[in-house]
Amino acid sequence: MLQTLQNTLEWRGWGLNLLTIGAIASCFFTILQGIGIWKQNLRVRCQKSGESVSVIFFSYSLFYFFAFMAYGIFKQSIAMTFNGTLGFVSIPILAALWRYKRFTKIELASFAVFPLMIPAMILMEEERDILLLIFLIGVLFSIARQAYEAWESADTSTIDPVFIAIFMATNAFWLLYAIAIDNLALIIFNPISFVLFLFIFLMYWKKGRKT
């Protein structure tokens, strides 16, 4: 166990540097992300509505997080592996959406396609970095789907603003960590993700805040 810990990126690069600061901040914000996802879950359950909350976003996030956990294990990164545990937190909100929102055929089909990310990340050893980039592009499309539903909906009060704000802040700190470990996929992903979440937050502020 100790040997495994000593082989991690964070252990080998420990010190007063961008890697350590970014890793600690990323773990801290992973906890906040979990709280944010749980708050969004409670908001859906309390309002008994999934309007303006994207099933595609959360179904994709569920399986992406588990694939990212596998990626973190193979890359020997504590921060990445820990961030992947958010997949477990995503399960209750999908259960809530299943109860209070009618799933389309495409949304139902996503549960047959998205899980394939996990075995692909485990088995395709030499292509993991490319797979991560592809999966992150998928995350951007899923966030864009959430942004579209927020823009299309007349009432975005079901969206939890704390959840969105936490994910925006997380993007900022993950960008620092990505720069520190020189991960191009994460460097490209986080600024774009930040802008999309900002748009969602503005849609909440415009349509759902008063409600």
Image: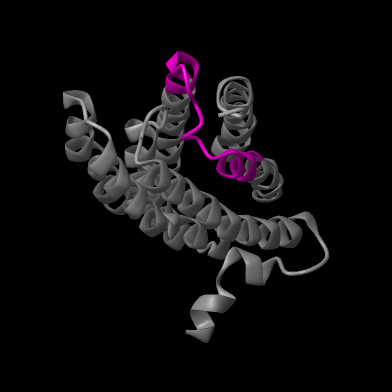
Secondary structure that dominates the magenta span: helix
Q: Nearer the viewer, residue 103 or 70?
A: 103
Query: Is 20 on the left-hand or right-hand side of 91?
Result: right
Q: Position of residue 58 (x, y in %)?
A: 37, 40
From where the camera sits, is residue 182 visible?
A: no
Q: Nearer the viewer, residue 186 or 205?
A: 205
Tell me the quarter of the picture where residue 210 sits: top right
Q: Quadrant of the C terminus?
A: top right
Q: Residue furthest bottom?
A: 2
The residue that appears at 56% across and 68% down in the rendered structure is 8
Tell me which segment is drawn in magenta.
148-168
Q: How many marks?
A: 0
Query: Is 20 on the left-hand or right-hand side of 203?
Result: right
The residue that appears at 63% across and 26% down in the rendered structure is 205
Q: Position of residue 75 (x, y in %)?
A: 49, 58
Give the answer, above or below, for where 107 lies relative to 90.
Answer: above
Q: Position of residue 208 (x, y in %)?
A: 55, 27
Q: What color scheme is it?
A: one colour
From where the camera sits, is residue 26 visible?
A: yes
Q: Is residue 166 magenta?
A: yes
Give the answer, above or below, for where 129 lies relative to 52.
Answer: below
Q: Residue furthest front?
A: 211
Q: Is residue 146 magenta?
A: no
Q: Position of residue 165 (x, y in %)?
A: 64, 40
The residue that appears at 53% across and 40% down in the rendered structure is 160
